[in-house]
Amino acid sequence: MVKRFTTRWTHQYSLVGSLGLGRMDLKFLDFEQPIAELEAKIEELRFVGDDSEISINEEVARLKGKSAALTKSIFSKLGAWQIAQIARHPMRPYTNDYLGYFAPDFQELHGDRMYADDPAIVSGVGRLDGRSVMFIGHQKGRDTKERVRRNYGMPKPEGYRKAQRMMKMAEKFSMPIVTLIDTPGADPGIGAEERGQSEAIAHSLYLMAGLRTPIISVVIGEGGSGGALAIGVGDRLLMLQYAVYSVISPEGCASILWKSAEKAEEAAEAMRITAGSLEDFGFVDEILPEPLGGAHRDPAAAAEVVRNALLHHLEQLDRLDIDQLLEERQRRIAGFGQYKE
Amino acid sequence: MSWFEKLMPSRISTEKRTRSVPEGVWIKCQECDAQLYRTELERNLYVCPKCDYHMRIGARRRLEYFLDPDSQQEIAASLESRDPLRFKDSKKYKDRISQAQKKTGEKDALVAVTGTLHSRPVVACAFEFAFMGGSMGSVVGERFCRAARHSAENKMPLISFSASGGARMQEALFSLLQMAKTSAALAVLGDMRVPYVSVLTDPTTGGVSASLAMLGDVNIAEPKALIGFAGPRVIEQTVGQRLPEGFQRSEFLLDHGTVDMIVDRRELREQVADLLAKFEHRPRPVS
C-alpha cells in the first residue's frame, strides 16, 4: 500500500517536474523552431511584465494567437519523418502517464515467474470507468537513469513472458486486455538472444491469436517492429494521431536499403509509417486526435481521448460472445496482406 | 551451367535452378576449403563429405531431398506480390521482385507443397533464401497460412524449413503483420492437434525467427546454422563488442534450450518421419 502511494506520488511529481516548468522547456523539435522563437518572445514579454509603461498584455495575446495559428499550420502538413520525431518526443506521455490519468487505482504486477522482471514492460490490473481491465504497455524512461533502467522501452524475453502471464490471467478472470504500444523495438542484446527473444515474441503472437478475452491495442508513440507487435495482436488497433508503426526503424531501413542512415526521412515516407497511411491500408480502426502540437502539450487531454476511445471499443466488443469475437479476430488477422492470385 | 544449357534459350529450359550453391563441376567448401566434386556433393545433399559443413540449398532442392520422390503437389503456386506501397528505394520493389523471380525461377520466397514422407501424407514448405534473402512479405505469409490450413483441414502434419533474413522491408507493415498471421494459423493448427515441425536452417533471423520458425511442437536446427532474433551485426553495433565464437549458432541454441535437437541433413527424413509417427501413434516407418 505504502509502496503504491510512493510510486503514485513520484509519478505525479515527475509530471509536474517535466511539464510544469513553462513553455520554454517544451523541447521544440527542429521543424517547430518558428514556434519556439515566438514562444521565446512571449516569455520575454512576460518577464518585462508590469513595470513597463506600455500595455504588454495585448501584445502577448496577439503573439499567442499567432503561435497557435503557426502551430496549426506547421502541424497540418507534417511529413512521416517529422511525425516520427513527435512520436519519439522526450516529453511524450508514456504508459505510466496514461495509467495515472485514466486508471488511478492501477496495481502493477511484476515478473515472468521464470527469470526476472522487465521494467521495459509495465503490466497489471486497473479499472477503466469502474470495470476491471488488464493493462500491458511498454515504458520508456523520462530521465537518463530511468531510461537506462527501462532499457529505452526495449523489452527482453522476460518482458514478453511477463506479458503472456498477464494475458492468461486476464483470460482466466474474464478481463479485457488493453495494451499501450511505445517501443523502438525488442532488445537486440546478447542476453536477449540467450534467453530466446525470438521464441518469446513468437509465443506472444501465438497466444494472442487465440486468447478468449477482448484485446485492444493503442499505439501511443513508437510502434517498433516485432517488439511492438508482440503485444499488439487483437481485436482493435487504435493509433494516436502522431504515433508511428513500422516494420523497422526509418534509420534501420535507410541504412540497409539506401546504405545510409541519413536517408531516414525518405525511408519513413516510403514505409508509410503514419496513422493516416495505416488507416488507409485498413490496419488501424481509429485514429485518436491529439492536442494541438502533440500529446505532450496537454497529456491530460490526450489521456481523455484515449480513455473515451477505449470505452467505446470495449463496449462494441462486449456485444460479441467469445466465439464470435475469436472468429472475427481470426478473420481479421488472416486478412493481413495484399497479393494477386 | 553446361554448354548445352547455355545454348538453350532460357524460356525453353524448364529446370528451375537455385543459385544458393555456386555452379561448376568443382565446388569449394566454405568451411574447410576442400575441393569437392559436384555429383558427389549432390549425392551427399550438399553436406561437405570432409567436414560435414551444411551448405545452403534452395527451396526446391530442400523439398526434393525431404519428401518421397515424385510425391509433390504445389500449394498456392500462383500467388504473386502486389507491391501495395509502390515501394522504391534505390531501386523499385517491383524490379527487385522480377529480378529475384528471374534469378530463382520462383514467384516468391516460399514454396509450399503437399507430399509424402515415408508414405505418410504431409504438408511441407521451404524458404528460398536466394529470393530477396528469403524475406517474408504478403505472399510468403499467405502461402504459409494456406499450407497450414491444408494441413489442419486434412490432419496432415506440417513441416517448415526456414531460411530467411526476416520481414520484407519493402512491404513495410504488411510484412510485419505476416508474423501475426502465420502465428495465428499455427495456433489453429495447434488447436487441431496436428503436429508442426519447424526445421531452422542457415540463416533464420528477424521476423521469421520471431514467428513461425520458433513455434514448432519440435524445433530442429541443422548443424551450425545461424539462428537469432537480431542479426549479429546489429548486436555488435548495439553492445559495442565482438560476439563470441559460435554465438547464435545451432549448438548455442540447443545449449540455451531454444531448439529440441540438431539433426544432420542426411538424417532429417528419418528423424522427422519417426517423430511424427510417434506423435501419431504409428510404428516406426521403414525406409
Image: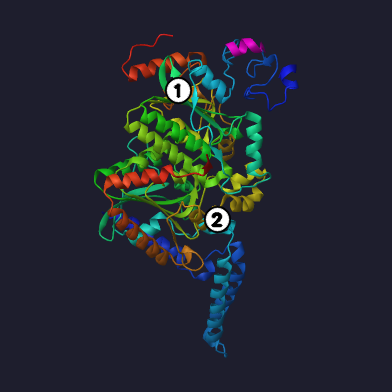
Q: Quadrant of the N terminus of chain A?
A: bottom left
- Residue range of the region highlighted in magenta in the rendering: B36-43
Quarter of the rendering containing residue A327: top left
x%, y% of residue A61? 53, 82
Amino acid type at mark 2: Ala
Say whether marks 1 and 2 touch (CB < 8 Å).
no
Q: Which marked residue is nearer to the observer: mark 1 or mark 2?
A: 1
Q: Which residue is mark 2?
A: A84
The image quadrant of residue B275 is top left
Residue depicted at 48% across the width and 40% down the height: B178
Q: Where B168 sits versus A292, above or below?
A: above
Dominant secondary-structure state across the stretch colored magenta: helix
Residue tagged by mark 1?
A: B220
Q: Is residue A12 left or right of residue B42?
A: left
Label 2 packing within 10 angstroms: few (<14), some (14-19), many (20+): many
Is residue A176 in sight in this rendering? yes
Compare residues A278 and B224 and report the one nearer the observer: A278
Residue B37 belongs to the span the image colors magenta: yes
Q: Which mark is residue A224?
A: none
